[in-house]
Image (cartoon, helix red, strand yellow):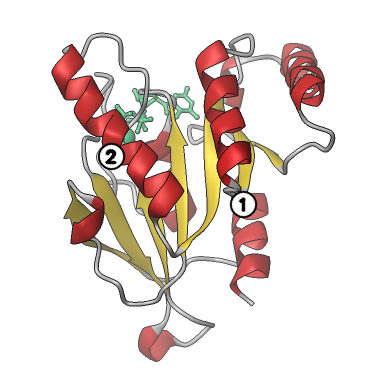
Amino acid sequence: MKITSAKFAFSSGKLSQIPKDGLREFAFIGRSNVGKSSLINMLTGQKGLAKVSGTPGKTRLINHFLVGGGASGGGPAWYLVDLPGYGYARASKRVRAGFEGLITDYVTKAEKLWFLFVLVDVRHEPQRLDMEFMSMLGEEGVPFGVVFTKADKLGTNALAANVANYRQELLKRWEELPPIFVTSSEKRTGGDEILDFIEQHLH
Ligand code: GTP
Ligand code: MG
């Protein structure tokens, strides 16, 4: 699947602000600065759609982007959802509690959250915060997959080794591996697999 039209729809600071229009939501989450907004721009082919920044904590609200539907046809419309990053160490406690509450609320209560992509920087060893977050998703029954980001920052061998190591770590906690995607927004790789996966979940 290719995205032919995507536009910003709305920002929400509270779950109750998200309009209930029945469209399915595919959301992207992960630590601050992991590359969520960049990935959304790659998937939609629109560079400036989601705001990207070298400063962690850029995205503070839940941003919905409306994809497809309308006159162009090509299946039902759906939302791509950009979430604030979790674990942003430099935010004040109060600010952090605020958007982490928002994230938890969204992932556990949003009725139309169809699938959650959890992004992790492929350069790093498995991090406790990400593992704990995925455990919470498991407990809450939220369907999720893992998206490795910034694959361009590693050579072929290191990339394969890190992905293999992460799979091992996941298998310590899960009987079955979640769907796994390897991406680089810089090199524009791995996006087709994510879009094909989404397409399968739209029907
Ligand atoms: P927050 O909204 O702050 O939580 O960050 P985010 O997860 O949305 O990250 P964002 O997309 O803003 O990217 C953070 C930084 O990482 C930016 O400087 C991006 O240019 C860089 N970046 C993102 N994806 C990639 C990638 O695939 N490769 C490389 N080399 N850099 C990337
Ligand atoms: Mg962002």
User: Residue 69, percent across and down?
Assistant: 42, 81
State the residue at coordinates (41%, 73%): 23
Q: How many marks?
A: 2
**Residue name at image x 34 percent, y 38 percent:** 103
Residue drawn 40% across the image and 53% down it: 109
- For the residues carrying marks 1 and 2, which lies nearer the camera in this image? 2
Label 1: how many Cα within 10 Å (few below 14, some 14–19, many 20+) = some
Q: Quadrant of residue 192?
A: bottom right
Task: Determine the CA span between mark 1 and mark 2.
Answer: 25 Å
The crowding category of the residue bearing disc 2, from other C-alpha atoms within 10 Å (few below 14, some 14 to 19, many at least 20), is: many
Pinpoint residue 27: horizontal percent, then vertical percent.
Answer: 45, 50
Residue 95 visible in the current orientation: yes
Mark 1 vs ligand 1: CB below 8 Å: no
Q: Is residue 189 visible?
A: no
Instruction: Give left or right: position of 171 versus 101.
Output: right
Q: Is residue 178 above or below residue 32?
A: below
Between discs 1 and 2, the one toward the N terminus: 2
Give SS at disc 2.
helix
Residue at 37%, 86% in the rendered image: 70
| Residue type (three-letter) at the residue carrying disc 1 | Ile
Task: Using the rendered view, name the quadrant where residue 25 is placed.
Answer: bottom left
Q: Position of residue 119 (x, y in %)?
A: 53, 32
The residue nearer to you, when weighing 29 against 36, is: 29
- Quarter of the picture containing the N terminus is bottom right
Quadrant of ligand 2: it is top left
Q: Amino acid at mark 2?
A: Leu
Residue 159 lies, with reference to residue 60, above or below; the image says: above
Q: Reply above or below: 61 against 135.
A: below
Q: Nearer the viewer, residue 180 or 155?
A: 180
Q: Disc 1 marks which residue?
A: 194
Q: Which residue is mark 2?
A: 102
